Amino acid sequence: MNIEEITIAGKSKNPLKVRRFGYGTMRLTGPGIWGEPANRTEALQILKQCIANGLNFIDTADYYGEDVTNRLIAEAIHPYPAGLVICTKVGGTRRPDKSWIPHNRPENLRSSIDNNLRTLKLEQITLVHFRAIAGEGAPFKESLGAMFEMQKEGKILHVGVSNLSAEELETAMAIGPIATVENMYGHAQRNSVQLAHGGITNGGEEVLAICEKNAIPLIPYFSLFQSLPKKDERIAAIAKKHNATEAQVNLAWLLHRSPWLLPIPGTSSLAHFEENLKAVDIKLSEEDMRFLG
């Protein structure tokens, strides 16, 4: 299996090279992204298989669970192998009713970073995404400024952002060096991005264009989410042509769409994890890509 690499923060003093296929841990939690996994043994196996298969980018957050995925990561693969990038997110938290709310004031962000450091058993977090969540909280510039302050202190090596429109990304880049962007993006939802203020804009391709122009990896979440009312027959046709599943074709499309996309499909099934990984071996032709649109 040959997985090409992508460079994160290539213009910085500390660039990172990771394989362009990672793993998102959110699905390792219980129902509603809350509580312990239904099969803890399988969850630990999946994380170990990430390392065994050469994946070196794992996405997590301390509000997955709560703290469930961070603790699973540490249990499964600590001490961490050289070159592994564990990317976490801050800026949100959960209420007891499982709703998502902003947790983005400077003191909130600092406590979240400290919590991530503790549960992941790290002295510095290699990459942290500030995730914009709709609701009352600190102004965007104040929150992101606090992230860069913690970077100066050495708690964070690289700062990324998540859930932004193209305009918000431009604002973020004016505040400090943005290493990565994590947004909803996939074949079925290229043209819709959830904004920090709760609205929807047709900014998916616009964000990707900014990332490509500035050599910033775009990490798509929910890339297998089907937002259309019915399945896309184009995906089904290409899946049949390549003797693949539709999920595999969706992932292969991302890998072919742009060299600056870093897919992180998540699952709680070891069999599904192995199936997803086979997407890197699917070679879509230019004709396939034109057909997929």
Image (spheres, rainbow, N blue to C red):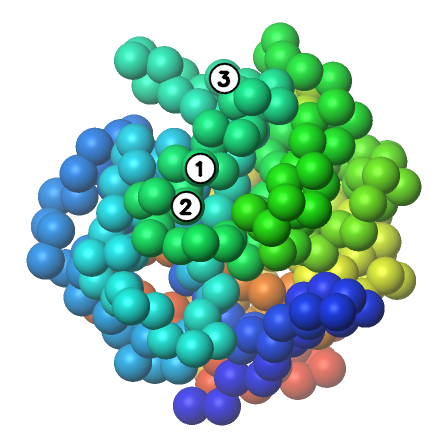
**How far apart are the alpha carbons under marks 3 and 1?**
19 Å
From the viewer's perspective, is residue 21 above or below residue 184?
below
Which percent across, then down, holds residue 89?
A: 51, 41
**Residue 114's quadrant in the figure?**
top left
Q: State whether residue 87 appears in this view.
A: no
Instruction: Name the side, left or right, on which 148 lies relative to 56.
Output: right
Camera-side mark, 2 or 3? 2
Of callouts 2 and 3, the N-terminal one: 3
- Whether pointer 2 and pointer 3 mark residues with C-beta atoms closer than 8 Å, the reply is no
Picture residue at 17% right of the left edge, 38% below the top: 36
Near-viewer residue (205 or 124): 124
**Given the image, on which type of amino acid does mark 1 rest?**
Asp
Which percent across, then down, holds residue 253?
A: 60, 69
Near-viewer residue (179 or 185): 179
Near-viewer residue (5 or 225): 5
Label 2: which secondary element: helix
Residue where numbered disc 1 is placed: 114
Residue where numbered disc 3 is placed: 101
Picture residue at 47% right of the left edge, 28% below the top: 111
Which percent across, then down, holds residue 174?
A: 89, 41
Of callouts 3 and 1, the N-terminal one: 3
- Whether pointer 1 and pointer 2 mark residues with C-beta atoms closer than 8 Å, the reply is yes
Residue where numbered disc 2 is placed: 117
From the viewer's perspective, is residue 29 above or below residue 245?
above
Image quadrant for the N terminus? bottom left
**Residue 91's quadrant in the figure?**
top right
**Residue 202's quadrant in the figure?**
top right
Label 1: which secondary element: helix
Picture residue at 75% right of the left edge, 61% below the top: 216
